[in-house]
């Protein structure tokens, strides 16, 4: 794990966030059955969502906002609201992950989940959340899924996490996850997605 200060990194990241407001969006093709849904969403590589996040881990935790943008294997996530932490950015490019804190300190993360917990007392499933938010398993790990009456994933066991998708709502012309809960040990993550954009 390496740390360095790069205030300009935050400036570039914020500029990227602002720039995406002008990006056009498209509607997804019909996701009529599970295999079609899984295939289409696994292959979707340019999208973003905005929502609200709550994380608890014993006596630690926070409620805030989460913005996530995916461009192929590259993702950028902004988490705002943790008390005493402020807004942080997590950027990933394949296996390489970095954490940018509000003071401009950039840290390369070897194991994002364990290092977030060591630093803040809470963590999020960084590597798999991009798939779970779409309502599909992470294809990189074994999983066991359950489905609702509409054939959408409603439950998932993967990587020592138990995921429940309690509600789907319209997003990009299709039913997309709106409320998601993920638990692992004493960690509980709650996500409400307010807006989906596919490009």
Image: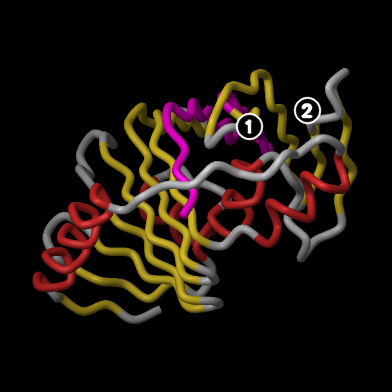
Judge from the rendering whether residue 138 lies leftward or rightward of residue 128; answer left or right.
right
The quadrant where residue 180 appears? top right
Secondary structure of residue under mark 1: strand
Question: Which residue corresponds to the image point at 42% horizontal and 32% vertical from the top-left?
Answer: 195
Main secondary structure found in the magenta portion = strand
Question: In which quadrant will I find the N terminus?
Answer: bottom left
Q: Position of residue 151 (x, y in %)?
A: 86, 29
Disc 1 target residue: 174
Left or right, 163 with respect to 75, comes to right
The scheme the figure's colours follow is secondary structure
- Res. 6 image quadrant: bottom left
In this picture, is 99 found above or below 59? below
Q: Nearer the viewer, residue 98 or 166?
A: 166
**Disc 2: which residue:** 154
Q: In the depicted view, which residue is nearer to us: 71 or 92?
A: 71
Q: Is residue 153 left or right of residue 13?
A: right
Residue at screen point 74% across, 45% down: 136
Q: Nearer the viewer, residue 120 or 191?
A: 191
Q: Residue at x 55, y 77 (%)?
A: 95
Q: Position of residue 18 (x, y in %)?
A: 18, 52
Query: What residue range appears in magenta?
Result: 178-199
Please say if the residues under marks 1 and 2 sit with CB atoms less than 8 Å apart. no
At mark 2, the secondary structure is strand
Q: Nearer the viewer, residue 136 or 6?
A: 136
Residue 44 location (% of width, % of height): 61, 58
How many badges with numbers are in the image?
Answer: 2
Q: Tell which circle, 1 or 2, labels the residue nearer the N-terminal end.
A: 2
Tell me the number on the disc at residue 56: none
Q: CA distance from mark 1 to mark 2?
A: 16 Å
Dot 1 crowding, Cα within 10 Å, few <14, some 14–19, many 20+: some
Point out the frontmost of discs 1 and 2.
1
Looking at the picture, does residue 149 appear above or below residue 9? above
């Amino acid at each position: 794990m390496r740390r360095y200060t790069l205030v300009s990194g935050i400036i570039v990241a914020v500029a990227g966030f602002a720039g995406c407001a002008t990006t056009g969006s498209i509607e997804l093709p019909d996701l009529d059955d599970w295999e079609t849904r899984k295939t289409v969403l696994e292959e979707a590589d340019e999208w973003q969502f905005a929502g609200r996040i709550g994380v608890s881990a014993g006596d630690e935790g926070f409620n805030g906002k989460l913005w996530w943008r995916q461009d192929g294997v590259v993702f950028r996530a902004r988490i705002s609201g943790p008390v005493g932490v402020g807004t942080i950015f997590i950027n990933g490019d394949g296996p390489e992950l970095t954490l940018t804190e509000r003071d401009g300190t950039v840290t390369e993360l070897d194991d994002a989940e364990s290092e977030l917990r060591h630093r803040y007392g809470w963590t999020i499933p960084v590597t798999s959340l991009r798939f779970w938010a779409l309502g599909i398993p992470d294809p990189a790990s074994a999983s066991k899924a359950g489905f609702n009456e509409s054939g959408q994933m409603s439950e998932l066991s993967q990587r020592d996490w138990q995921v429940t998708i309690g509600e789907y709502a319209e997003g990009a012309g299709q039913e997309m996850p709106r409320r998601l809960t993920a638990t692992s040990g004493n960690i509980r993550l709650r996500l409400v997605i307010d807006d989906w954009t596919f490009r």
